[in-house]
Image (tube, grey):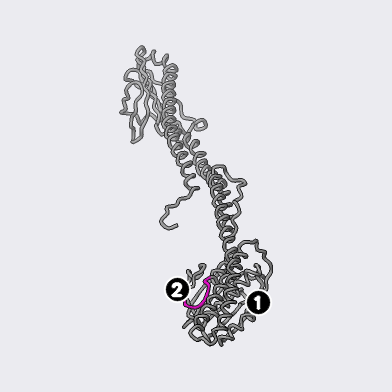
């Protein structure tokens, strides 16, 4: 509806569920990153400390006995080397004398790290140092490790944590989407079932397999349908009863008018008034008959069958042709034979009869009327009458509306045609017949 802000319930539910999940994942991931970094730093610092103490224990005896004692490390063995060896270094000092150092520590020439843990930058790389000073022996053990080892391990640990999470989030969103879609399916089924109903089907909505959260809406709709059904039934009963009650007095009035017309043969001043009265009674009687037929059609269940609309149109045209002859109208027919549709015989007859009857009624004397039925199921009635302005075309399809025309009529003809079209899912269109007149076209579904 225009001006009404609408939103998707599915997307609303998806956002209410997915946004907290994503936010929780970000918070958990941030905490996991901080916790992993802290714990890994603690573990690596402990390893540095342990390595320093092991090196002290291994070299303490030899270094204590010789002031300038130096330990020569053997050549590196490629068969037992590891790719992380270059990231770990150590140096051992006796006082200010360098006792030994690893190959990767040769670039530490001017580095003098303080005791305990510290961070040092060497050749644009950050190293973590642990310096252990044994004051009893004067031995200093210096162990260092590149920070990128810690970063690499943190990335791997977090990668193993976030890789499943990256798969879990879209999978969760997909499952939530499918779940909400499945949960909303009963509503879509109800909507589709209601859309398929015709205008006269006011039976309660089937409440099977409906979520209990939606049941209040279904109950409210069913109560509304019951009230509408009751109101329409009372309206039809009133129309039916009123039509029945009006037929008898109208028939009596017509009879009395005919008697008065005969008696007023020698009174010209009364003849015109009686003729007008007789025409008014005929118009009222015709409207009552239409109301009665319309009411009866709407008040009962209609049966659909295979109808030869070609034969029906020809028969109705033959039945109404004397009216066209009386007005000296030229009536042409172009009806393709054996066109079959599925419909109610009485409703289709009312539709065709009213179209042709209206064309004859509103077309002046010596006018032209054309009735055509094409093989694709399009029934067209064209006349050379006054036509209908564009502003009135929708209005004339309502009950008791005759537009701006001054011709006689009840205003029910096109309303009944519209009702029959809706009953058969046929498309009705009103267009101008240039230079003058009206074209009424009805597109029906043809049986193959």
Residue 411 is situated, as x and y percent measured from the top left of the image, at: 52, 71
350 relative to 158 in the view: left or right: right
Q: Residue at x 37, y 26 (%)?
A: 129
On the image, numbered disc 2 is attached to which residue? 390
Residue 105 or residue 426, whichever sits in front: 426
Q: Quadrant of the C terminus?
A: bottom right
* Residue 409 covered by magenta stretch: yes
Q: Badge 2 local density, few (<14 within 10 Å), some, or many (20+)?
A: few
Q: Quadrant of the N terminus?
A: bottom left
Q: Residue at x 33, y 36 (%)?
A: 124
Residue 348 or residue 51, whichever sits in front: 348
Q: Please, what secondary structure does the residue beneath circle 2 have?
A: helix
Whether residue 325 is visible here, answered yes or no, is: yes
Q: Please, what secondary structure does the residue beneath circle 1 have?
A: helix
Whether residue 72 is visible here, answered yes or no, is: no
Q: Is residue 69 above or below residue 187?
A: above
Q: Which quadrant of the figure has residue 336?
A: bottom right
Q: Which quadrant of the figure has residue 375?
A: bottom right
On the image, numbered disc 1 is attached to which residue? 310
Among the two numbered marks 2 and 1 on one chain, the one whose residue lies closer to the N terminus: 1
Query: Does the magenta stretch mainly form a helix, a strand or a loop?
Result: loop
Spatial CA span between label 2 and label 1: 30 Å
Residue 40 is situated, as x and y percent measured from the top left of the image, at: 44, 28
Residue 252 is situated, as x and y percent measured from the top left of the image, at: 59, 73
């Amino acid at each position: 509806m225009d001006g009404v802000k609408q939103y998707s319930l599915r997307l609303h539910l998806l956002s209410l569920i997915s946004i907290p999940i994503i936010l929780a994942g970000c918070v958990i991931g941030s905490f996991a990153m901080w916790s992993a970094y802290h714990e890994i730093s603690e573990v690596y610092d402990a390893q540095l400390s342990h390595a320093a103490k092991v090196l002290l224990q291994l070299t303490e005896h030899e270094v204590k006995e010789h002031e300038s004692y130096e330990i020569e490390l053997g050549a590196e063995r490629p068969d037992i080397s590891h790719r992380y060896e270059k990231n770990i270094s150590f140096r051992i000092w006796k006082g200010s004398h360098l006792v030994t150092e690893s190959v990767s520590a040769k670039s530490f020439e001017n580095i003098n790290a303080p005791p305990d843990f510290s961070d040092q930058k060497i050749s644009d790389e950050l190293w973590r140092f642990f310096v252990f000073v044994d004051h009893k022996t004067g031995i200093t053990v210096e162990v260092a490790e590149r920070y990128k080892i810690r970063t690499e391990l943190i990335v791997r640990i977090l990668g193993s944590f976030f890789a499943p999470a990256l798969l879990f989030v879209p999978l969760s969103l997909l499952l939530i989407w499918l779940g909400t879609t499945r949960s909303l399916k009963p509503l879509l089924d109800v909507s589709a079932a209601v859309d398929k109903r015709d205008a006269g089907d006011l039976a309660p909505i089937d409440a099977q397999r409906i979520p209990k959260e939606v049941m209040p809406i279904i109950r409210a709709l069913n109560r509304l349908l019951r009230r509408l059904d009751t109101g329409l039934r009372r309206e039809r009963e009133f129309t039916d009863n009123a039509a029945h009650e009006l037929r008898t007095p109208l028939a009596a009035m017509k009879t009395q008018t005919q008697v008065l017309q005969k008696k007023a043969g020698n009174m010209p001043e009364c003849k015109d008034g009686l003729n007008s009265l007789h025409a008014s009674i005929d118009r009222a009687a015709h409207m009552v008959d239409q109301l009665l037929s319309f009411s009866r059609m709407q008040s009962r269940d209609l049966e659909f069958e295979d109808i030869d609309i070609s034969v029906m149109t020809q028969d109705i045209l033959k039945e109404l042709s004397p009216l066209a002859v009386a007005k000296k109208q030229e009536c042409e027919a172009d009806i393709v034979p054996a066109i079959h549709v599925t419909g109610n015989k009485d409703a289709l007859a009312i539709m065709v009869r009213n179209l042709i009857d209206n064309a004859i009624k509103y077309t002046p004397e010596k006018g032209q009327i054309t009735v055509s039925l094409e093989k694709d199921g399009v029934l067209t009635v064209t006349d050379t009458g006054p036509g209908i302005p564009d502003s009135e075309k929708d209005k004339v399809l309502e009950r008791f509306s005759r537009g701006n025309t001054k011709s006689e009529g009840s205003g029910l003809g096109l309303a009944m045609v519209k009702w029959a079209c809706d009953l058969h899912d046929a498309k009705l269109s009103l267009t101008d017949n240039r230079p003058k007149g009206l074209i009424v076209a009805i597109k029906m579904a043809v049986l193959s």
